Image (cartoon, rainbow, N blue to C red):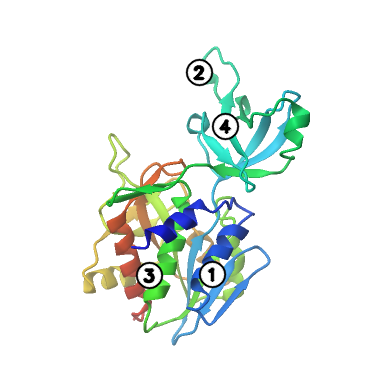
């Protein structure tokens, strides 16, 4: 597996609404594999690979969670708003990096009771002497993301931004392996998923697909006393049944099941009650689009150490290729 490409994707600094860096990396990787490439007004990267049959839209989001600076106090400490979902307990003492490489550490005001910790008690410390020094380095509205390198040990891959650079990676690698597509394919690397499925909404409206499949992380329910969801690491490609944004269409679920069985690809089912995916936007576009999701079970989602199994990534790639080379009955 192309671990170096996955590391490169995860290292891109591309918070929601600022997907340019990751978009350029993906564009360079796939430009010779597709018939056309364009970036729309909302920042979606749309790659068209011509094929027979109906339109199939594939979606994986490029954006990642991050922070936006909202205030600089007289001592030079930065207050921030979150972009996407964070836990304040996870944020404390984490390093963040701005696009220009400036680093900061999240600190917390003195609290008499740790239970009083909340986002408004936290600040970002860039080591500035005072407000004047800080303002030479950052301004209101600047954004930053987790600063942590990727790592792997042969069986698992660990990194921030696996949500959803892993989905983008699966799409890229599947595109490289495609030989005889059964659909007219639109690979859409979407923007602003973490703040409301916005890129997928506009892309689906313009493409008007007949079917939709998105790629995203999901909860791995195999850690001590985890909530009993069906997906787990080393369980294979996860075929979604539902999340808070959609009920997956039986036609797409059946297609993915059949392809996995026919190709002897390891698969499992997935149900997510705490979030949504790009297919949540795709399936209600215009007159409706039968949609599903291929998920990868991931531990510690939205932290600096999201973790997934390399064998599951390989199963997801294999299932994607088989699903795109097999017509839907």
N-terminal of the two: label 4 or label 1? 1
Looking at the image, residue 100 sits to the left or right of residue 300; the answer is: right
Q: Dots 1 and 2: beta carbons under 8 Å?
A: no
Residue assigned mark 1: 28
| Residue 223 pos. (x, y %) | 29, 39
Query: Residue 235 location, x and y as percent?
Result: 25, 54
Q: CA distance from mark 1 to mark 3?
A: 31 Å
Q: Which residue is mark 2?
A: 114
Residue 275 seen from this side: yes
- Return the residue found at the far top: 112
Question: Of tags 3 and 2, which is closer to the observer?
Answer: 2
Q: Which comes before the other along the chain, label 1 or label 2?
A: 1
304 relative to 135 in the view: left or right: left
Residue at x 56%, y 59% (from the top left corner): 22
Residue at point 40% right, 64% down? 170
Q: Residue furthest bottom?
A: 52
Mark 2 lies on a secondary structure that is helix
Between marks 1 and 2 in the image, the one whose residue lies nearer the viewer: 1
Mark 1 vs mark 3: in front: 1
Q: CA distance from mark 3 to mark 2?
A: 47 Å
Q: Which mark is residue 252?
A: 3
Q: CA distance from mark 1 to mark 2?
A: 47 Å
């Amino acid at each position: 597996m192309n671990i170096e490409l996955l590391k490169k994707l995860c290292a891109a600094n591309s918070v929601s609404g600022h997907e340019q860096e990751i978009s350029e990396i993906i564009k360079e990787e796939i430009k010779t594999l597709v018939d056309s490439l364009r970036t729309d007004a909302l920042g979606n990267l749309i790659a068209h690979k011509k094929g027979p049959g109906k339109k199939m839209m594939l979606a994986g989001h490029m954006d990642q969670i991050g922070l936006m600076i909202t205030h600089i106090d007289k001592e030079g400490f930065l207050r921030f708003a979150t972009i996407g979902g964070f836990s304040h307990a996870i944020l404390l003492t984490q390093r963040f990096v701005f696009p220009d490489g400036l680093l900061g550490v999240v600190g917390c005001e003195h609290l008499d009771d740790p239970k009083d910790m909340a986002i408004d008690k936290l600040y970002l410390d860039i080591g500035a002497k005072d407000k004047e020094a800080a303002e030479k380095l950052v301004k209101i509205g600047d954004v930053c993301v987790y600063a942590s390198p990727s790592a792997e040990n042969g069986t698992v891959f660990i990194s921030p931004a696996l949500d959803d650079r892993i989905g983008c990676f699966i799409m890229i690698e599947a595109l490289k392996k495609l030989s005889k597509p059964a659909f007219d394919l639109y690979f859409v690397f979407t923007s602003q998923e973490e703040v409301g499925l916005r890129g997928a909404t506009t892309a689906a409206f313009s493409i008007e697909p007949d079917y939709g499949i998105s790629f995203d992380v999901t909860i791995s329910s195999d850690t001590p006393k985890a909530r009993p969801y069906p997906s787990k690491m080393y369980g294979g490609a996860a075929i979604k049944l539902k999340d808070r944004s959609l009920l997956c269409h039986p036609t797409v679920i059946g297609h993915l099941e059949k392809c996995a069985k026919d190709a002897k690809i390891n698969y499992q089912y997935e149900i997510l009650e705490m979030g949504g995916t790009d297919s949540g936007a795709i399936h209600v576009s215009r007159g409706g689009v039968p949609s599903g999701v291929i998920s990868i079970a991931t531990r510690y989602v939205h932290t600096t150490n999201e973790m997934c199994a390399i064998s599951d990534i390989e199963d997801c790639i294999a299932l994607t290729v088989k699903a795109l080379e097999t017509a839907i009955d």
